[in-house]
Protein backbone atom coordinates (compact mmCIF):
# COMPACT_ATOMS: atom_id res chain seq x y z
CA UNK A 1 0.00 0.00 0.00
CA UNK A 2 1.10 3.54 -0.74
CA UNK A 3 0.61 6.39 1.77
CA UNK A 4 0.70 10.04 0.63
CA UNK A 5 0.16 12.98 2.99
CA UNK A 6 -2.58 15.33 1.71
CA UNK A 7 -2.19 18.43 3.94
CA UNK A 8 0.86 20.10 5.55
CA UNK A 9 -0.29 19.06 9.05
CA UNK A 10 -2.24 15.82 8.65
CA UNK A 11 -4.37 13.55 6.48
CA UNK A 12 -3.15 10.78 4.17
CA UNK A 13 -4.35 9.02 1.06
CA UNK A 14 -3.83 5.26 0.83
CA UNK A 15 -3.90 3.43 -2.48
CA UNK A 16 -3.05 -0.12 -3.46
CA UNK A 17 -5.02 -1.72 -0.62
CA UNK A 18 -8.05 -3.96 -0.95
CA UNK A 19 -10.10 -4.29 2.23
CA UNK A 20 -12.24 -7.17 3.39
CA UNK A 21 -12.71 -8.99 6.69
CA UNK A 22 -9.54 -11.08 6.08
CA UNK A 23 -6.90 -8.36 5.81
CA UNK A 24 -3.77 -9.51 7.67
CA UNK A 25 -3.05 -8.22 11.17
CA UNK A 26 0.06 -6.45 9.86
CA UNK A 27 -2.17 -4.20 7.72
CA UNK A 28 -4.39 -3.37 10.71
CA UNK A 29 -1.25 -2.38 12.63
CA UNK A 30 -0.04 -0.22 9.73
CA UNK A 31 -3.43 1.49 9.54
CA UNK A 32 -3.46 2.16 13.30
CA UNK A 33 0.03 3.67 12.98
CA UNK A 34 -1.12 5.81 10.03
CA UNK A 35 -4.16 6.99 12.03
CA UNK A 36 -1.95 7.96 14.96
CA UNK A 37 0.35 9.91 12.67
CA UNK A 38 -2.08 11.46 10.17
CA UNK A 39 -5.41 11.58 12.09
CA UNK A 40 -7.41 10.98 8.89
CA UNK A 41 -6.76 8.35 6.23
CA UNK A 42 -8.54 8.18 2.88
CA UNK A 43 -8.51 4.64 1.53
CA UNK A 44 -9.41 4.80 -2.15
CA UNK A 45 -11.27 2.30 -4.35
CA UNK A 46 -13.21 0.21 -1.81
CA UNK A 47 -16.34 -0.16 -3.97
CA UNK A 48 -16.31 -3.91 -3.31
CA UNK A 49 -16.49 -3.61 0.50
CA UNK A 50 -19.97 -4.73 1.58
CA UNK A 51 -21.78 -3.50 4.71
CA UNK A 52 -21.10 -6.80 6.49
CA UNK A 53 -17.42 -6.68 5.52
CA UNK A 54 -17.16 -3.09 6.73
CA UNK A 55 -18.52 -4.16 10.13
CA UNK A 56 -16.14 -7.13 10.38
CA UNK A 57 -13.17 -5.03 9.26
CA UNK A 58 -14.03 -2.34 11.80
CA UNK A 59 -14.25 -4.91 14.60
CA UNK A 60 -10.52 -5.53 14.19
CA UNK A 61 -9.87 -2.05 15.64
CA UNK A 62 -11.86 -2.38 18.87
CA UNK A 63 -15.38 -2.47 20.25
CA UNK A 64 -18.05 -1.50 17.74
CA UNK A 65 -20.60 1.12 18.73
CA UNK A 66 -24.25 0.63 17.93
CA UNK A 67 -25.96 3.42 16.04
CA UNK A 68 -27.87 5.92 18.16
CA UNK A 69 -30.52 5.96 15.43
CA UNK A 70 -31.79 2.76 17.11
CA UNK A 71 -33.22 5.00 19.82
CA UNK A 72 -35.32 6.97 17.36
CA UNK A 73 -38.52 4.94 17.29
CA UNK A 74 -40.39 7.40 15.06
CA UNK A 75 -38.13 6.79 12.03
CA UNK A 76 -37.54 3.81 9.73
CA UNK A 77 -34.00 2.47 9.49
CA UNK A 78 -33.01 1.61 5.90
CA UNK A 79 -29.85 -0.25 6.90
CA UNK A 80 -30.69 -3.16 9.15
CA UNK A 81 -27.41 -3.89 10.99
CA UNK A 82 -27.37 -2.14 14.39
CA UNK A 83 -23.71 -1.15 13.90
CA UNK A 84 -24.44 0.92 10.79
CA UNK A 85 -25.35 4.58 10.93
CA UNK A 86 -26.97 5.79 7.73
CA UNK A 87 -25.73 9.26 6.80
CA UNK A 88 -27.63 9.33 3.54
CA UNK A 89 -30.62 11.11 2.06
CA UNK A 90 -32.10 7.88 0.73
CA UNK A 91 -35.22 6.25 2.17
CA UNK A 92 -36.11 2.58 2.68
CA UNK A 93 -37.45 2.42 -0.91
CA UNK A 94 -34.19 3.69 -2.40
CA UNK A 95 -35.69 7.11 -3.16
CA UNK A 96 -34.20 10.51 -2.41
CA UNK A 97 -35.66 11.87 0.83
CA UNK A 98 -37.45 15.14 1.16
CA UNK A 99 -34.77 17.45 2.67
CA UNK A 100 -37.21 18.00 5.58
CA UNK A 101 -37.54 14.29 6.36
CA UNK A 102 -36.98 13.77 10.12
CA UNK A 103 -34.05 11.42 9.42
CA UNK A 104 -32.35 14.13 7.39
CA UNK A 105 -33.10 16.80 10.01
CA UNK A 106 -31.51 14.57 12.63
CA UNK A 107 -28.27 14.60 10.60
CA UNK A 108 -28.01 18.39 10.69
CA UNK A 109 -25.63 18.59 13.68
CA UNK A 110 -23.11 16.87 11.38
CA UNK A 111 -22.70 20.22 9.62
CA UNK A 112 -21.31 21.73 12.83
CA UNK A 113 -17.68 20.98 13.73
CA UNK A 114 -17.65 17.91 15.96
CA UNK A 115 -15.89 14.83 17.21
CA UNK A 116 -18.11 11.77 16.82
CA UNK A 117 -20.02 10.52 19.81
CA UNK A 118 -18.27 12.87 22.25
CA UNK A 119 -21.63 12.94 24.11
CA UNK A 120 -21.34 9.23 24.82
CA UNK A 121 -19.36 7.44 27.48
CA UNK A 122 -17.11 5.94 26.22
CA UNK A 123 -16.90 8.42 23.33
CA UNK A 124 -15.95 7.63 19.73
CA UNK A 125 -12.42 6.54 18.87
CA UNK A 126 -12.24 5.74 15.14
CA UNK A 127 -15.00 6.44 12.61
CA UNK A 128 -15.14 4.54 9.30
CA UNK A 129 -17.21 6.19 6.58
CA UNK A 130 -17.85 4.46 3.27
CA UNK A 131 -19.01 6.45 0.23
CA UNK A 132 -21.44 4.42 -1.86
CA UNK A 133 -23.03 7.27 -3.84
CA UNK A 134 -21.29 10.64 -4.09
CA UNK A 135 -23.20 13.69 -5.44
CA UNK A 136 -21.59 15.36 -8.48
CA UNK A 137 -21.32 18.68 -6.62
CA UNK A 138 -21.01 19.58 -2.93
CA UNK A 139 -21.09 17.21 0.03
CA UNK A 140 -17.37 17.48 0.86
CA UNK A 141 -16.30 16.69 4.42
CA UNK A 142 -13.94 19.04 6.23
CA UNK A 143 -11.46 17.87 8.87
CA UNK A 144 -9.50 19.95 11.40
CA UNK A 145 -6.23 18.87 13.02
CA UNK A 146 -6.75 19.45 16.73
CA UNK A 147 -3.11 18.63 17.55
CA UNK A 148 -1.81 21.35 15.24
CA UNK A 149 -4.40 23.69 16.76
CA UNK A 150 -3.21 22.85 20.28
CA UNK A 151 0.42 23.31 19.26
CA UNK A 152 -0.41 26.79 17.93
CA UNK A 153 -2.06 28.02 21.15
CA UNK A 154 -0.21 30.69 23.10
CA UNK A 155 1.19 29.69 26.47
CA UNK A 156 -1.47 31.57 28.48
CA UNK A 157 -4.29 29.76 26.66
CA UNK A 158 -2.57 26.39 27.13
CA UNK A 159 -2.37 27.07 30.87
CA UNK A 160 -6.02 28.09 30.92
CA UNK A 161 -7.41 25.04 29.10
CA UNK A 162 -5.30 22.31 30.67
CA UNK A 163 -7.17 20.30 33.29
CA UNK A 164 -10.59 21.67 32.27
CA UNK A 165 -13.53 19.35 31.67
CA UNK A 166 -16.45 19.87 29.31
CA UNK A 167 -20.00 18.55 29.48
CA UNK A 168 -21.15 17.14 26.12
CA UNK A 169 -24.78 16.66 25.19
CA UNK A 170 -26.59 15.55 22.05
CA UNK A 171 -29.57 17.71 23.06
CA UNK A 172 -27.26 20.74 22.90
CA UNK A 173 -25.87 20.12 19.38
CA UNK A 174 -29.38 19.31 18.13
CA UNK A 175 -30.57 22.63 19.49
CA UNK A 176 -27.63 24.50 17.93
CA UNK A 177 -28.30 22.88 14.55
CA UNK A 178 -32.06 23.43 14.63
CA UNK A 179 -32.69 19.66 14.70
CA UNK A 180 -35.63 17.96 16.42
CA UNK A 181 -35.14 17.59 20.20
CA UNK A 182 -34.36 14.25 21.86
CA UNK A 183 -37.24 11.79 21.76
CA UNK A 184 -38.30 10.12 25.05
CA UNK A 185 -36.36 6.95 24.08
CA UNK A 186 -33.28 8.99 23.22
CA UNK A 187 -33.55 10.83 26.53
CA UNK A 188 -33.72 7.56 28.41
CA UNK A 189 -30.76 6.00 26.55
CA UNK A 190 -28.34 8.80 25.70
CA UNK A 191 -27.07 10.53 28.84
CA UNK A 192 -24.63 13.46 28.78
CA UNK A 193 -20.90 12.89 29.17
CA UNK A 194 -17.98 14.76 30.68
CA UNK A 195 -14.71 14.85 28.71
CA UNK A 196 -11.30 16.45 29.17
CA UNK A 197 -10.70 19.58 27.07
CA UNK A 198 -7.09 18.62 26.38
CA UNK A 199 -6.15 15.04 25.61
CA UNK A 200 -2.88 13.20 25.18
CA UNK A 201 -2.75 10.64 22.40
CA UNK A 202 -1.69 7.35 24.02
CA UNK A 203 0.47 6.36 21.03
CA UNK A 204 2.17 9.59 20.00
CA UNK A 205 2.06 11.56 23.26
CA UNK A 206 0.79 14.55 21.28
CA UNK A 207 -1.76 16.80 22.95
CA UNK A 208 -4.96 17.88 21.21
CA UNK A 209 -7.92 20.13 21.93
CA UNK A 210 -10.94 17.89 22.41
CA UNK A 211 -13.75 20.07 21.11
CA UNK A 212 -17.11 19.23 19.59
CA UNK A 213 -20.42 20.91 18.81
CA UNK A 214 -21.84 18.57 21.46
CA UNK A 215 -19.71 20.39 24.09
CA UNK A 216 -22.14 22.54 26.05
CA UNK A 217 -20.34 24.03 29.04
CA UNK A 218 -17.13 23.90 31.01
CA UNK A 219 -17.27 22.45 34.50
CA UNK A 220 -16.58 25.05 37.18
CA UNK A 221 -17.24 28.01 34.85
CA UNK A 222 -20.48 29.95 34.33
CA UNK A 223 -22.48 28.84 31.27
CA UNK A 224 -21.68 32.13 29.51
CA UNK A 225 -17.93 32.01 30.24
CA UNK A 226 -17.67 28.32 29.35
CA UNK A 227 -19.49 28.78 26.06
CA UNK A 228 -17.43 31.84 25.18
CA UNK A 229 -14.24 29.84 25.77
CA UNK A 230 -15.47 26.88 23.70
CA UNK A 231 -16.51 29.20 20.85
CA UNK A 232 -13.18 30.99 20.89
CA UNK A 233 -11.23 27.70 20.80
CA UNK A 234 -13.50 26.34 18.08
CA UNK A 235 -12.95 29.42 15.89
CA UNK A 236 -9.20 29.23 16.49
CA UNK A 237 -8.81 25.53 15.70
CA UNK A 238 -10.90 25.55 12.52
CA UNK A 239 -8.90 28.28 10.77
CA UNK A 240 -8.01 27.36 7.17
CA UNK A 241 -4.42 26.34 7.98
CA UNK A 242 -5.71 23.49 10.19
CA UNK A 243 -8.41 22.26 7.78
CA UNK A 244 -8.34 19.57 5.10
CA UNK A 245 -11.39 19.48 2.80
CA UNK A 246 -12.10 16.02 1.48
CA UNK A 247 -13.73 15.75 -1.94
CA UNK A 248 -15.32 12.32 -2.05
CA UNK A 249 -14.90 9.85 -4.88
CA UNK A 250 -17.00 6.72 -5.31
CA UNK A 251 -15.56 3.91 -3.19
CA UNK A 252 -13.69 6.17 -0.78
CA UNK A 253 -13.44 4.66 2.67
CA UNK A 254 -12.33 7.35 5.10
CA UNK A 255 -11.19 6.57 8.63
CA UNK A 256 -10.42 9.16 11.31
CA UNK A 257 -9.26 9.36 14.89
CA UNK A 258 -11.83 11.36 16.87
CA UNK A 259 -9.31 12.10 19.63
CA UNK A 260 -7.11 14.24 17.41
CA UNK A 261 -9.46 15.62 14.74
CA UNK A 262 -12.83 17.31 14.32
CA UNK A 263 -14.93 17.20 11.15
CA UNK A 264 -18.11 18.56 9.60
CA UNK A 265 -20.33 17.79 6.62
CA UNK A 266 -20.88 20.48 3.98
CA UNK A 267 -24.12 21.00 2.03
CA UNK A 268 -25.01 19.71 -1.43
CA UNK A 269 -28.10 20.20 -3.64
CA UNK A 270 -30.39 17.82 -1.73
CA UNK A 271 -33.29 18.44 -4.07
CA UNK A 272 -31.27 17.02 -6.98
CA UNK A 273 -28.88 14.34 -5.85
CA UNK A 274 -28.53 11.24 -3.75
CA UNK A 275 -25.66 10.88 -1.29
CA UNK A 276 -25.17 7.45 0.28
CA UNK A 277 -22.71 7.24 3.18
CA UNK A 278 -22.47 4.39 5.67
CA UNK A 279 -20.73 4.72 8.97
CA UNK A 280 -19.34 2.35 11.58
CA UNK A 281 -17.45 3.39 14.68
CA UNK A 282 -15.30 2.09 17.50
CA UNK A 283 -15.59 3.23 21.09
CA UNK A 284 -12.73 4.70 23.05
CA UNK A 285 -12.62 2.30 25.96
CA UNK A 286 -9.02 2.96 26.81
CA UNK A 287 -8.90 5.21 29.84
CA UNK A 288 -9.42 8.73 28.49
CA UNK A 289 -6.12 10.44 29.13
CA UNK A 290 -6.47 14.05 30.16
CA UNK A 291 -3.46 16.32 30.07
CA UNK A 292 -2.05 17.20 33.48
CA UNK A 293 -2.28 20.87 34.47
CA UNK A 294 0.81 22.75 33.33
CA UNK A 295 3.37 22.70 36.11
CA UNK A 296 1.76 19.78 37.97
CA UNK A 297 4.13 17.30 39.56
C1 LIG B 1 -19.86 11.30 10.22
C2 LIG B 1 -20.00 12.64 9.64
C3 LIG B 1 -19.87 13.89 7.59
C4 LIG B 1 -20.33 13.75 6.20
O1 LIG B 1 -19.86 10.32 9.48
O2 LIG B 1 -19.71 11.19 11.45
O3 LIG B 1 -20.05 13.60 10.35
O4 LIG B 1 -19.86 14.56 5.37
N1 LIG B 1 -20.03 12.69 8.31
O5 LIG B 1 -21.16 12.87 5.93
MN1 LIG C 1 -19.52 12.95 12.42
Image (tube, rainbow, N blue to C red):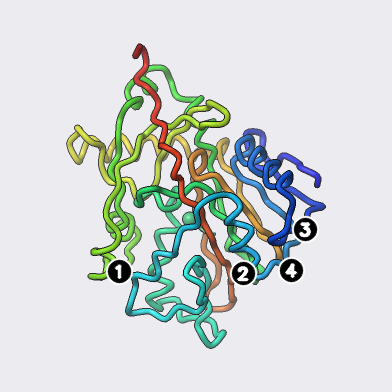
Q: Position of residue 216 (x, y in %)?
A: 28, 46
Q: Mark 4 vs mark 3: which is more N-terminal?
A: 3
Q: Mark 2 vs mark 1: which is more N-terminal?
A: 2
What residue is shown with label 2? Answer: 52
What residue is shown with label 4? Answer: 48
Pointers 4 and 3 in contact (CB under 8 A)? Answer: yes
Q: Residues within 10 Å of mark 2 (few under 14, many from 20)?
A: some
- Per the model, the C-alpha gap separating discs 2 and 3 is 15 Å
What residue is shown with label 1? Answer: 180
Asked if residue 131 is positioned above or below residue 203 in the image, the reply reads below
Q: Position of residue 295 (x, y in %)?
A: 36, 12
Of the two numbered discs 2 and 4 in the rendering, the one whose residue sits closer to the viewer: 2
- Per the model, the C-alpha gap separating discs 4 and 3 is 9 Å
Q: Residues within 10 Å of mark 1 (few under 14, many from 20)?
A: some
Of the two numbered discs 3 and 1 in the rendering, the one whose residue sits closer to the viewer: 3
What residue is shown with label 3? Answer: 18
Amino acid sequence: MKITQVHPHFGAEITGLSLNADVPESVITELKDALAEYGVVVIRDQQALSDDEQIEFCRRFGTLQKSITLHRKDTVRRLTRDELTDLSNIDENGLRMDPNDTRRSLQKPGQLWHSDNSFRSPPGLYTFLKAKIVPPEGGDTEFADMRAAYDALDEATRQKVTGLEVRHSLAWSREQAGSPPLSPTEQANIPESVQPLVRVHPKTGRKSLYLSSHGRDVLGMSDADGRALLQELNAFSTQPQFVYRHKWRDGDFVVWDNRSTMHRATPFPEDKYQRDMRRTSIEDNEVAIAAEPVGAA
